[in-house]
Amino acid sequence: MGNNDCNEGLLVLINRVAAARGLLRRFGIDALLFTDLKDIRYQCGFTGSEGLLLVGAGETFLLTDSRYTTQAREETSGCDVIEFREKKAALASLAADMGFQSLGFQDQQVTVSFYNELLETMPGVRFIPLGAAPALQRIIKDSREIKSLEKVAGIASESFLEVLRTVRPGDTERDVSIRLEFALRTAGADDKAFEFIVASGVRGALPHGRATTKTIRSGELVTIDFGALLDGYNSDETVTIAIGEPDGKQRLIYQVVKDAHDQALDAIRPGAAFRDIDAVARDYIARQGFGDFFGHGLGHGVGLDVHEKPVVSFRSEEVVREGMVFTIEPGIYLPGWGGVRIEDMVVATTDGCRVLSRVPKGLMVL
Ligand code: ZN
Ligand code: ZN
């Protein structure tokens, strides 16, 4: 990374903390307490697995344990790194030193027991729930994030295409899953993004069917939902393939899902409501007679988390804005028969969207 990249990266973090400070006024509080590790990484660059970030009007503190203090000082700048032995006690004494009497906290992230312990340890402090506000800060990706997401999506897609050439009837779902994980780790991914779904034949009716020891047979459709993790960013893509020549019903259902997927992609533009984009795909599937067999939402945001804002469904309150990265993943699941899902990851642009995942979505027959 060159010096310019470093400076640019630092500027990004400074801007994020400044944006977070906007919440102090909005909620009328003295400081923000970040407990979610992805949000902490987003705000200050710290990648360890234990820590609290406390953001006041003029200062930022990262509290972590002795395993991470050196790393934290290297990864962050502009924040005081404080080593703790007992997390809540350290937070309580810091808040007392700083005179913080009200703290915004991530009520959608902390456990009830952690919250109760905070109340007990810090009886003089008011805890104000921030709701979705911290998560919403991550909803629009900057150009560096989009680059990271495009890169990780590319690694996953290329790995998938490589593994696809080896898939044969007689392989188990698990065989395919393991080969895919090996391929994307070999291609440079830090990890898989989640437990892959490999659902063949009738198991395709399970939208979240984990790979089992079931043998893949000729005449089956196989739904493979996979993703990679690189530098903290995730990818998410689903491909449904045919093993051997598909029959008429398999072709028909595949085409309905593909058309729904394509129409939804065409409907993406800044200002469009996600609820309406969901309806484009959902109404089309219903008109083709499969309305009862597409139960889940159309998609979700992807970034530091595999599932994050925006919500892309009939329940969504959000509209598309340039720089949002999310999935479009319609599916039809027929109990006792099987299923089809097609998922791409896209970034919203000034006049539409750009697809970040790379596997072509025409029906591939092996
Ligand atoms: Zn997926
Ligand atoms: Zn997804």
Image (cartoon, helix red, strand yellow):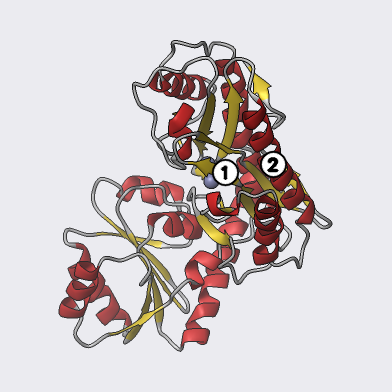
Find residue 268 and report its horizontal and vertical position in percent: 75, 56
Q: Determine the secondary structure under disc 1.
A: strand
**Nearer the observer, 287 or 28:** 287
**Nearer the observer, 192 or 99:** 192
Instruction: Identify the mark at residue 108; answer none if there is no mark.
Output: none
Please indicate, yes or no, whether residue 255 appears anywhere in the rendered image.
Answer: yes
Find residue 339 and report its horizontal and vertical position in percent: 53, 37
Quarter where residue 331 is shown: top right
Quarter where residue 362 is shown: top right
Q: Determine the secondary structure under disc 2.
A: helix
Residue at x 40% of width, y 17% of height: 215
Find residue 162 and report its horizontal and vertical position in percent: 59, 16
Relative to 338, 50 lies left or right: left
Instruction: Identify the mark at residue 256; answer none if there is no mark.
Output: 2
Quadrant for the N terminus, please: top right
> Few, some or many C-alpha atoms within 10 Å of disc 1 (few <14, some 14-19, many ≥20)?
many
Contact, mark 1 vs mark 2 (Cβ under 8 Å): yes
**Callout 1, which amino acid?**
Ile
- Up the image or down, 256 lies above or below 179; here it is below
- Up the image or down, 97 lies above or below 196; here it is below
Pointer 1 residue: 332
**Nearer the observer, 233 or 245:** 245
Q: CA distance from mark 1 to mark 2?
A: 9 Å
**Callout 2, which amino acid?**
Val
